[in-house]
Image (cartoon, rainbow, N blue to C red):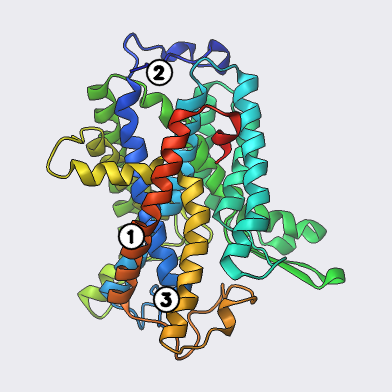
Amino acid sequence: MPTIQNPSPAVGLEAHVDSKPAKRARLDSVDLMRGMVMILMALDHVRYPYFTNLSFFPEDIQQTNAALFLTRWLTHFCAPLFFLLAGTGAYLSLAHGKSVKAVSRFFWTRGLWLVLLEVTLIEFAWSFKPGWAFGGVIWALGWSMVMMAFLVRLPLVGIAAFGVGMMVLHHLTDGLSPETFGKFSWLWMLLHSGGMIKIESLGFGFPILYVLIPWSGVMAAGYALGHILTWEPARRRRWLLGLGAVMTLAFILLRATNLYGDPRPFTAQATLEKSFIMFLNTSKYPASLQFLLMTLGPALMLLAWFDRFDFHSRFGWLGQKILVFGRVPLFFYVLHLFTIHLLAIVVGLIYQQPLDWLWGQPLPLGRPAPPEYGHGLPFIYFMTLFVVVLLYFPCRWFANLKQRRRDWWLRYL
């Protein structure tokens, strides 16, 4: 198998040269992690908004229970790993023999392509309403990549410092509201606070869920992490495990003390179950430091374990199937939205439930399922399994196509 060589010194990595570069085959661990993320994402989107029967959000401490909350909590790992692994994947695929100019060009072209997809095809898949759009995860991924097009010109240590610094320090600006910036309030919503950007003259509103601060920092940190993954296997596993353990312990400490890093403080509840839920109920919109530590810490430790994964073991066949999704993430993303949305309409017809909101209406970002609609958790898990099995076949076909061919446009899908 080919090896990942050290990137051009122009990228600023001349102080990080390894005598034994890692074999590309071992990086199946990254694709396996990405595949797991895609499955969890499918669970999240089957649950909300398309199949849930809840009249409240699972984060509502007064009404939720452990099963509802933990289902939602598992899906919290998706967005942080999207951004982290997007940076990591870019380093692993582009740093090999590429110039700074080539790396930068990929980032800005891929990023703008993602933004275009988000506001057209992807958001049509969400709502089946032409022209409706919001600032979702693909939107933020795209603009973060555009930002990375400039950052890759820094030395690797500078990119790492930018990423970690943004993740840790962004709460220092929490006191700034969009109104502070007057007519540029929309820019602060895009960068940090989120919210509804309104263009009164056009009667148009653009909701922002995912902001660039700190998500672009997560991508930058992931790019730096890619360098660690080129190290000798035992060494990289120690670093992944150590970094993950430190981040997880930092989350526990910060959450238990309410010292820093989340606008939603932990308070003991009347029952152990509610206290446990409250402990894990950190802020995602916008993402807090505690939220990132809570998700990325365990994920890095899991990645270290995946790096040891034996595809010839008893569960190797399952790992091979999951690997397929990790190799075609954008293809899976677009396909799974159309599939889940169409299935929701079919199932709604079968169960004779209200369907007007599923066709040609804005996605209900601010409210749970309509009355008399939806299903419980067992049905949601069943539908998730059905969707994953159904999409395995087109994803396997596309993964094989990408393996056989090297057309430039395949990198953008």
Which quadrant: the N terminus?
top left
Residue 330 on image: x %, y %: 51, 47
Q: Is residue 48 visible?
A: yes
Q: Nearer the viewer, residue 246 or 117?
A: 117
Identity of the amino acid at label 1? Leu
Which quadrant: the C terminus?
top right
| Residue bearing mark 2 | 4
Q: Which residue lies most toward the right here?
A: 201
Q: Nearer the viewer, mark 1 or mark 3?
A: 3
Element marked by disc 2:
loop
Figure check: 175 above or below 5: below
Q: Nearer the viewer, residue 385 or 178?
A: 385
Label 3 neighbour load within 10 Å: few <14, some 14-19, many 20+: many
Identity of the amino acid at label 3? Phe
Distance in Å between CA atoms under marks 3 and 2: 43 Å
| Residue bearing mark 1 | 74
- Name the residue rendered at 49%, 30% in the picture: 160
Identity of the amino acid at label 2? Ile
Residue 19 on image: x %, y %: 33, 8
Of the numbered discs 2 and 1, the one sitting upstream in the chain is 2
Q: Name the mark on residue 365.
A: none
- Does 217 sit left or right of 130 as displayed? left
Element marked by disc 1:
helix
Q: Nearer the viewer, residue 393 or 361?
A: 393
Q: Which residue lies most toward the top here?
A: 19
- Name the residue rendered at 57%, 51% in the picture: 138
Q: Name the mark on residue 51.
A: 3
Residue 338 on image: x %, y %: 52, 63
Label 2 neighbour load within 10 Å: few <14, some 14-19, many 20+: many
Distance in Å between CA atoms under marks 2 and 1: 32 Å
- Name the residue rendered at 78%, 56% in the picture: 184
